[in-house]
Image (spheres, rainbow, N blue to C red):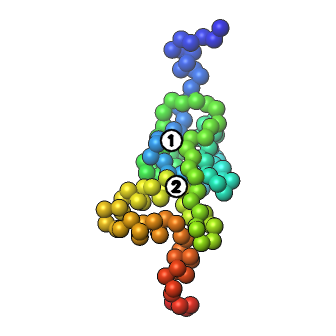
């Protein structure tokens, strides 16, 4: 029978980077991590932020980079895990990935009071090149 005492549970955790629900899986934290403790797994359908706690050296580069304040240190599971995930939103014109659904939901929440729904829907559904073509802009502009 496993030991479920507080001491046993405390030793099963390590001081590591943790991700809050405010993470939009933008990936800004990944390239600044000097040990690859944070990585993105991308299958063109969704993107996942994976944490490998044993590789973290507590340099705080990721924390200082995250504009969402979604990263912090706390006691956590020592096993590698998917800390956050979001589906990709693909351009309805060309099929390229535009942004994560979490990113676009955040943008919509911040802009919905200032812009009409049709504008926000257009902005969310087309990449910059297809927006340009949809607007009928002549070449060279």
Within the image, what quadrant is residue 130 found in?
bottom right
Residue 21, horizontal then vertical, whole percent: 46, 42
Cα–Cα span, label 2 and label 1: 17 Å
Give percent across and percent down for residue 38: 60, 46
- Disc 2 crowd, CA 10 A, few/some/many (<14, 14-19, 20+): some
- Residue that numbered label 2 is attached to: 101
Q: At x 47% / y 69%, what residue is drawn? A: 122
Q: Give the crowd class for mark 1: few <14, some 14-19, many >=20 residues within 10 Å.
A: some
Q: Going 43% across and 51% down the picture, which residue do you hit?
A: 68
Q: Residue 74: where, in percent of width, then height?
A: 48, 33
Q: Mark 1 points at which residue?
A: 19
Residue at the image point whose x is 60% and y is 11% from the top: 3
Residue 68 in view of the camera = yes
Front position in the image: 3 or 86: 86
Residue 98 figure quarter: bottom right
State the residue lying farthest toward the left: 113
């Amino acid at each position: 029978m496993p030991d479920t005492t507080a001491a046993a549970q405390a030793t099963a955790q390590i001081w590591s980077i943790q991700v809050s629900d405010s993470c939009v899986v933008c990936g800004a934290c990944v390239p600044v991590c000097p040990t690859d403790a944070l990585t993105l797994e991308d299958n063109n359908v969704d993107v996942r932020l994976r944490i490998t706690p044993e590789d973290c050296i507590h340099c705080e580069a990721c924390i200082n980079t995250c504009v969402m304040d979604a990263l912090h240190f706390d006691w956590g599971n020592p096993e590698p895990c998917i800390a956050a995930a979001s589906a990709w939103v693909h351009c309805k014109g060309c099929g390229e990935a535009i942004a994560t659904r979490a990113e676009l939901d955040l943008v919509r929440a911040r802009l919905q009071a200032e812009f009409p729904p049709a504008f926000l829907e257009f902005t969310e559904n087309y990449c910059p090149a297809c927006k340009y073509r949809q607007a009928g802009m002549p070449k060279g502009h």
